[in-house]
Amino acid sequence: EQFGIPIGQFEGVQARLARLAGVAYQLDAARTFTCCGLDQGLKLSVISAIMKAHATYRMRVAVDDAMDVHAGKAVIDGPRNYLGALYRAVPVGITVEGANILTRNLIVFGQGAIRCHPYLRDELHALQSADTADGLRHFDRVVWRHVGHVIATAARTCLRNWSGTRLAPTPTGTPVAGHFRMLSSMSSTFALLADAALLSLGGELK
């Protein structure tokens, strides 16, 4: 209690507790999604990297919020301080066993861009083909599809952003339609920027 009032009734504390609950929900959903993939025998290298990076980042947010709620009790070391060791462990999780900066650059974006792109892997396989003539023919077919994909993505991005996401698709009958439209618009923009990075950086992408 503080001033004779349970601290859970203070709106500032409630805001921190709400964010803690949201982070816990996000991480549990991510854990369930990852485990479902593993149960199906999939090798989730990119998803595991995304999970590691975002789980440790969200741990930092959650521990900071918990420290704010507990105040001085979480600062003074002792047998009843169950947050002190966790607070000191936060930078270890972020920087060790694959520093998050490298994880995001090399795996999440680098490998993710290659594995998730609809044409890039086919282009790479065509260039590495033992049959040079057949590889070049296949590459020519795929690269023009890639060009069409970039043009379509650019047009889609311009329309969705110009309209303030109003032209972005969304499931019908959902109370969060605005969030779907915003996510769709941002996804188109990110796809266009990723293609621009691939075109300008090439093999230096990572």
Image (cartoon, grey):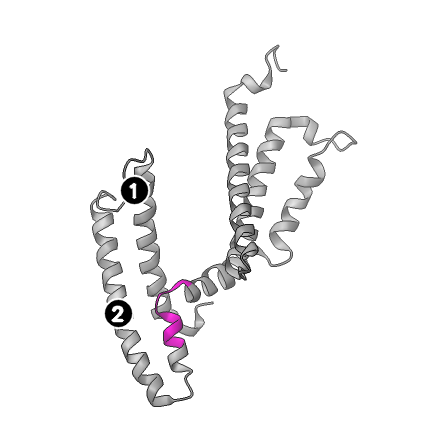
Q: In the drawing, what numbered circle is on residue 94? A: none
**Magenta run includes residue 117:** yes
Residue at 54%, 24% (x, y): give it: 13
Q: CA distance from mark 1 to mark 2?
A: 29 Å
**With respect to residue 112, does 177 lie above or below?**
above
Residue at 63%, 50% (x, y): give it: 93
**With respect to residue 62, does 198 lie above or below?**
below
Amino acid type at image mark 2: Val
Secondary structure beneath disc 1?
loop
Amino acid type at image mark 1: Pro
- Locate residue 140, reporting x and y percent: 28, 80
- Locate residue 110, reporting x and y percent: 46, 64
Residue at the outermost right position: 79
Q: Which quarter of the figure has residue 204?
A: bottom left
Task: Tell which of 137 and 4 is nearer to you.
Answer: 137
- Tag 1 residue: 171
**With respect to residue 171, does 113 lie above or below?**
below
Determine whether, in the image, residue 196 is placed left or right of residue 161: right
Task: Tell which of 21 and 7 is nearer to you.
Answer: 21
Q: In the drawing, what numbered circle is on residue 147? A: 2
**Disc 2 packing (10 Å; few <14; some 14–19; many ≥20):** few
**Magenta run includes residue 98:** no
